[in-house]
Amino acid sequence: MRMEKAPLILIVDDDDTLRDVLVEYFSGLGYAAMGAPDGRTALKMQARNPADLVITDLIMPEENGLETIIELKRHDPHVKIIAMTGSGHIGSLEDLKTASYLGAELTFAKPFQLEDLLRAVKELLQLPEA
């Protein structure tokens, strides 16, 4: 993890509104945050400018979140990953369990509280609670 700069968070979600809200939220808290609309784009961004933490949706077009987690961990086993998915679709709990097995450190069912996500980010990045 880069210590001289703010931690970089990559937010991967095909929902433009949620992705933009999360990028703005973390940017406003002093993190460096960037967004990707799908797994394929996220992997390209990660290769160019590796994030310290990736928050990824699981159900997306192009490359889904489970495939993205596999590829992220294959290229960088130390990257921290939070997986999220809508609690309304069939199999969402199984998808979150699978994400954990594939290497996601934490999982969230949507909707979730931003404060809970922030707490998880700080925990994974080993930042002090403030």
Image (cartoon, rainbow, N blue to C red):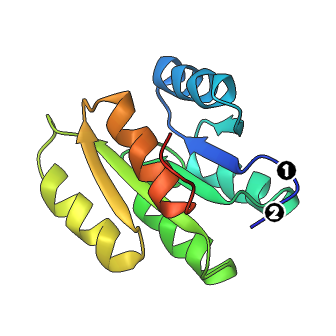
Residue closer to the observer: 97 or 130: 130
Q: Nearer the viewer, residue 83 or 16?
A: 83
Horizontal and vertical percent for residue 41? Answer: 69, 48
Q: Position of residue 112 (x, y in %)?
A: 27, 33
Q: Residue at x 77, y 46 (%)?
A: 6
Residue at (48% x, 43% y) in the render: 61
Amino acid tagged 2: Arg
Residue that appears at 49% across and 67% down: 69
- Crowd around label 2: few <14 · some 14–19 · many ≥20 (10 Å): few
Left or right: 101, with 24 as reference point: left
Which of the 4 quarters of the picture holds residue 54? bottom right
State whether residue 8 is above or below residue 103.
Answer: above
Left or right of 24 in this view: 112: left
* Residue where numbered disc 1 is placed: 5
Label 1: state its secondary structure: loop
Residue assigned mark 2? 2
Q: Is residue 76 above or below residue 93?
A: below
User: Few, some or many C-alpha atoms within 10 Å of disc 1 (few <14, some 14-19, many ≥20)?
Assistant: few
Residue 58 appears in the picture as rendered: no
Q: CA distance from mark 1 to mark 2?
A: 6 Å
- Report the amino acid beneath label 1: Lys
x and y percentages locating residue 40 in the rendered image: 64, 53
* Label 2: which secondary element: loop
**Does 51 appear above or below 85?**
below
Residue 129 in sight here: yes
Do the numbered discs 1 and 2 sit on residues whose CB atoms are within 8 Å? yes
Rendering quarter of residue 25: top right
Instruction: State the mark number for residue 43.
Output: none
**In terms of depth relative to the viewer, which is nearer, 126 or 102?**
126
Indicate the quadrant where residue 44 lies. bottom right
